[in-house]
Structure formats: structure tokens, C-alpha cells
Image (tube, grey):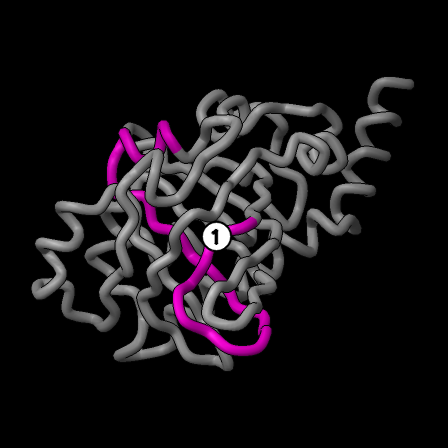
Amino acid sequence: MKTLFVALLITAAAQTSDEAKRISESTVVIEEMMAAGDKAIPGAILEKAEAIAVFPSLLKGGFVIGGQRGRGIISVRDRKSGTWSAPAFLTITGGSFGAQIGAQAIDLILVVNNQRGLEQLVKNQFKIGADASVAAGPIGRDASAATDIQMRAQILSYSRSRGLFAGVTVNGSTIRQDRDANERFYGTAYRTGQIVFDRLGGAPEPVGTWRDALVKYAK
């Protein structure tokens, strides 16, 4: 009885936490991204994705040389069952989006194309452009022109700024697993791999809504 009560408390806390907000915001990013018409990520790319990571409201800034910091989530597709894992929490720091002036918040989306890219990304620490090849992703409903890009890059990157989506080149950013957030949301400080591969932690809300969005757009 006590164990059940503790579990209920953890679930209730998870549903109202900052981590729950992070999942909900990432779901909104996916939904709005795919409603962008000719500026959306091609469905053919999402259908082949091994994993999708979203960093909502990533803060970037600087003059010519910029940096960013933010928090996000990643879910992995099980090819055998066709289902998506619950999200593991990540942080991103440093790096640059190239020439830029001022500061603004953007949404960053990473689409992982293959198993090697996925294995690199779920490590304790991953550096964009060093641990795996990352390229600005193509946009639009027709992905035929993006075949070469997709085959060469292990990860495709996209951003949204002021409501507009586009492929974006990101270099030098470091992505780390956020075990503190995993513990707050799931009740245990799971590693990323334990959540996305071993499927530990369960699926407290709003995980279901997030996974529904992935199933809808990355069939």
C-alpha cells in the first residue's frame, strides 16, 4: 500500500513538473513544425528516423560568434514494434549557429538517421559535428532532392525562429544526458539508454501525448 502511495505521488509530481512542461513544449514544436506546409520536415525523413530530439526555447546569442544553452528530450523508435520510447531528458550548451547578431530563443530539432548516430547521441556526452556528422536538414514535402544529404549525415538539424522553420548548421554544441531531470520525472536517475532502449521509467503524462505526435508524423 505504501509503495503504491509513493508511486502515485511520483506520478502526480511528474505531471506538474518542469520536465512535464518540457515534454509538452516539445510536442507543440513537433505539431507546429509539421503544420508548416512547404517549410515542414519532409515526411520521408521522419519515417526513416531512428530517433528525434527536440530542444524547445533554446537560448542563443552573441555577435558573429554565438553560443546557446537549453534543455530538451529524445525518444527512440523500436523498429520491431514500431513504437516510440518515453523521452529521456538532455541538456545542450556551447557551440555556434554561425554568423548572428543579438540574442533570441529558437526551437532546435535533431533527426537521427542511423544507428551509429543514435549510439553517439545517447552517450553521456555528445559533441555535435565531432562525434557524428550533422547537416542542415532539407525542408518541404518532397525529400527527393535531399537524398544525398540524408545518406551522408547521421543527424539532420532544424530550427525555428520567429515562427519560421529551416535547416540549420550547428557546430560545437555539447549534448549531455540530464539524469537529474530523469530522476525528478521518473523517480530514478536513469541513464538515457535505460529509458530509450530498455524502456524503464514508465510513461507518466504527458508522455502519451508526445508519443502520439511521433506516431502521427513519423509513421
Which is more toward the observer, 169 or 190?
169
Name which quarter of the figure residue 190 lies in.
top right
The N terminus: image quadrant: top right
> Residue 79: percent from the left, percent from the top?
28, 32
Which is more toward the observer, 31 or 55?
55
Q: Residue furthest right?
A: 2
> Residue 38: percent from the left, percent from the top?
26, 79
Residue at screen point 67% across, 33% down: 182
Secondary structure under the numbered disc 1 in the rendered image: loop
Which is more toward the observer, 180 or 102?
102
Amino acid type assigned to the residue bearing label 1 in the image: Gly
* 79 sits to left or right of 72: left
Residue at screen point 66% across, 30% down: 179
> Residue 177: percent from the left, percent from the top?
57, 34
Q: Is residue 26 above or below residue 84?
A: below
Q: Is residue 84 above or below residue 7?
A: below
Label 1 crowd bin: few (<14), some (14–19), many (20+), radius 10 Å: some
Q: Is residue 140 above or below residue 88?
A: below
Q: Which residues are magenta?
A: 94-120
Residue at screen point 31% across, 35% down: 117
* 184 sits to left or right of 204: right
Q: Mark 1 sits on what residue?
A: 95
> Residue 62: percent from the left, percent from the top?
56, 69
* 189 sits to left or right of 5: left
Q: Is residue 152 above or below residue 97?
A: above
Residue at screen point 15% across, 69% down: 142
